[in-house]
Image (cartoon, rainbow, N blue to C red):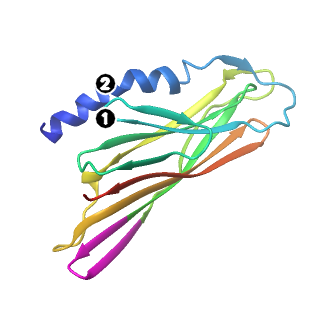
Amino acid sequence: MNRLIRIPLALAVLYPLLSGYTSCNQWDTTVVPDTDTRPPIAIAGYVNDRGKHIWNLGPVDVYTTDPNDQIIAVSSAWDAGGAREVSVGRDVTLYCRKGSLGQLTSFDYITQRASQNGGPGDTVSEGVYTYHIFNVADYHCAPGFEATKIVDSWVVVAEDFFGNQDYQGGNTITWTKN
C-alpha cells in the first residue's frame, strides 16, 4: 500500500482507540481536593497500524521487524484528584552498517508536555495525555549505510496539582532489520 495513503488510513483506524482511552473528555472529572499526598499514576501504551494496542503501568516493550510499521506511543497521567501534567523525555538511537563499518546516531527530543489548569476546589479531568508516532521510514543513515536497528526510548513523568510525581521509565519500541 502506498505510504501516503497508509498514514491517514492508519490514523483513521486508530483514532477511535486513542480518543476512547486517552482523551481528557473521556476520563471522569473530579474536584481537586484541598490536600493530596498520594502520587498520580504514570501510564504508557501503544497502538500499531494493525489495531493492536496495550496500556501498561509497567514498561512498554514493543519489537517489530516490519519496515512499514507506524506505532503511536501514548503517555498519560491519571489521578483520582486530577492529574496536572504529563511530561515525556524521549530519545531514538539509530544503528547503521556498511560492510564491517558501523554507525550509531542518537536523537534527543525536546520534552513533550500536556497539562491542564486548576487547583483545590476546581473541577478538572482525572487524566492528561500526549503521544508521539514512531515511524521506521523517518530515520535515515548516512549515504551508503543501511539501518539495522532503531530504538525509540521514552520515560513518562506524571504530576498532580500538589507536586506529587510518578515515574515510568524503560519504555521502548525496537525495530530490527530481518
Are the two marked residues, 2 and 1, in contact with CB atoms closer than 8 angstroms? yes
Q: Is residue 157 on the magenta stretch?
A: no
Camera-nearest residue between 172 and 12: 172
Q: Which residue carries the number 1 mark? A: 49
Q: Is residue 142 found left or right of 17 in the rendered image?
A: left
Residue annotated with mark 2? 13
> Furthest-bottom residue in view?
100
The disc labelled 1 sits on which kind of residue?
A: Asp
Amino acid marked by disc 2: Val
Find numbered disc 1 in the image and state the secondary structure of the residue it sits on.
loop
Q: Nearer the viewer, residue 91 or 125?
A: 91
Q: Which residues are magenta?
A: 94-106
Q: Residues within 10 Å of mark 2 (few under 14, many from 20)?
A: some
Most extreme residue toward the front is 178
Residue at x 75%, y 35% (from the top left corner): 161
Which mark is first along the chain, 1 or 2? 2
Tell me residue 54's x, y (percent). Answer: 48, 33
